[in-house]
Each structure stands twice: as structure tokens, then as C-alpha cells.
Image (spheres, rainbow, N blue to C red):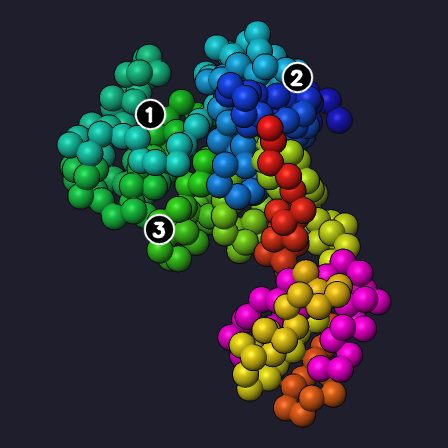
Amino acid sequence: MNNATLAIDVTGLVKRFGDLVAVNNLALQVRRGEIYGFLGPNGSGKTTTIRMLCGLLTPDGGSGTCLGYDVIRETRQIKRQVGYMTQRFSLYEDLTIRENLDFTARIYGMDNRNEAVERSLERLGLADRQKQLAGTLSGGWKQRLALAACMLHEPQLLLLDEPTAGVDPKARRDFWDEIHRLAGEGITVLVSTHYMDEAERCHRLAYIAYGHLLAQGTVAEVVENSGIVTWMVECSDVYVLGAQLRGLPGISQVVPFGNALHVSGTDKDLLEQSISPFREQPGCRWAPIQPGLEDVFIQMMEGAKPNV
């Protein structure tokens, strides 16, 4: 693949803040027109990476391109074609929806800002609320306004940093429907999230912890390459059984799911040996299952080491 097929192509990215290595030798390739999920715990380096990609932070090491432009030398060109949505709502709460969009269009120096504002209002379903103060909007509508502001200058790439944090499930679903519509128009989206159901809606994803890339690929590829084996057990008292299973050889995770437990490990034989006596208990139903993304990522996080 080359710049014609890749929106993001970076290798060896490093960013330090004093003694802290926030991003360590990170390589990332995102194809044009795809939705790429960026996952990891708080403090894993996701936001730092996003800010390096859009030219707000200069890498201390590494190289690569974003939309064909050098991430170190051509940050001005990158900024013109990227829409960046921050974790927190960053527009003015004492301005109306329209006033916020008009102000943002002025910052971009857009000659056709009135047309751009109208187009953005219609595109995100904000026209009927355009006179409403941003500070009175719910989390879902603030999210929609922030996305509208990102889209004003018709970027080729959207960098969305935990855009759905704190909004209700309906608003999250509506937001993701919009993201898929934009991807269908050829816009590339890199989105960080903590929600596993959102990760599963991405074409591909990457997982980082302590600034290190631990896995990337499609959901199926990430799960398959994890090496995790999972059993599900349904029983009347999952808490008692869970306490008995935790800490046994070959068992790395015991996670309650309602009246069931997911019991996981990376050594298939040792795991089965440890659960064997419990499979004979009356009232318990055991079955091997495919591990979920949450099982995979918890396993990865527990194995990751902090940077020093």
C-alpha cells in the first residue's frame, strides 16, 4: 500500500513528556475511507498519538505521512484537511448552534462560510435547533454540534477522540450511523473509544497500552491472534464459583456476566485441567465459547508494562 491507498502511514512514532514515554515506537496504517478504532486504557497514549497525527504535537522520533503530507514538516497542510473532535466539548456554551458554526467557519477563513454553515446544519440535523444555546444542549446534541463543526471545511480525515463518552445509547447509535454514512462518502475516520460494541463497528482497530501497539487488525483477527481460550459457565451462585476459580493455574480471568461466568486463559490444557473438577458440579453448565474483545483487551492490558 502507498499514499494513494493510505490516509495515515506512520512508523516509529515517539513522544516524551519529561521522563514519561507517552508513545513508544508506534506504527500505524489506516486505509482511506475506513473506520479505524483506536482502543486502550486511560493514559495509554491515544490522545497524544491523535495530536501528533493532526499536527498539534511534534513527534520526538519516527516518521510518516497523514493524507500524503509529512507529519513533521507539513503540519499546516494536514490541519487544512483534518477534522479533530476533542474529548471534551470545546465550543462556546453561551453561543447558539449557528453562532458556534459561524465562528468556527471564520477561524477556518472560509470564503463561503454562510453556505458551509447551512450545509452543516442540514447535514447533522441541527437546522431546527440552530438558535438554541449550546450550553442548553444534551450530551448527544453537543456531540452532533461538535461533529458539525469538524465537518465545516469538508475534511478528508476525521480524528475523533472518545466522541461518545457520556452520551446515552440512542445518541451513540445515531452518531455511529452518521460515521458510517461519512465513511461511505469516502471520508476516513480514526476514532478512539472505550466501548467494545463501538469497536466492533469499526473496519479495523488497534489496541495500545502505555504507548505500545499491542494488536491491530479486524475484530476477528485480533480475537483469533490473542491466543485466549474462554469457557462460559452458568450456575446458581456465580460469586461463590468465581471465588473458587480465581487464582487457579491457567486461569487469568474470571468475569461475571449475569448468571454466568467467562473463564479465560492462554494455556488451553492448563485451563481445562483447572476447571475439570468444577465441571462435575451439579447445576452448572459449561461450554467453550469465542472470547470477546473485552476478554482480549483485559488480557493484553494485564500483560503490558508501564514506560519509564
Task: Quote the CA–CA distance across marks 2 and 1.
Answer: 36 Å
Q: Position of residue 67 (x, y in %)?
A: 59, 20
Residue 101, quarter of the rendered image:
top left
Q: Nearer the viewer, mark 2 or mark 1?
A: 2
The amino acid type found where label 3 is placed reads Val
Residue at (49, 31) in percent of width and height: 47
Task: Quote the CA–CA distance across marks 1 and 3.
Answer: 27 Å
Q: Within 10 Å of the Cα at label 2, are there few (<14), some (14-19), or many (20+) other Cα atoms? A: some
Q: Which residues are magenta?
A: 253-278
What residue would you read off at disc 3? Answer: 167
Q: Which quadrant holds the N terminus?
A: top right
Residue 209, quarter of the rendered image:
top right
What residue would you read off at disc 1? Answer: 116
What residue would you read off at disc 2? Answer: 62
Mark closest to the chain's N terminus, 2 or 1? 2
Q: In the rendered view, tell whether residue 6 sits above or below residue 280.
A: above
Q: Position of residue 258 (x, y in %)?
A: 51, 75
Q: Position of residue 264 (x, y in %)?
A: 69, 64
- In the picture as drawn, the residue positioned furthest to the right comes out as 269
Residue at (71, 54) in percent of width and height: 223
Mark closest to the chain's N terminus, 3 or 2? 2
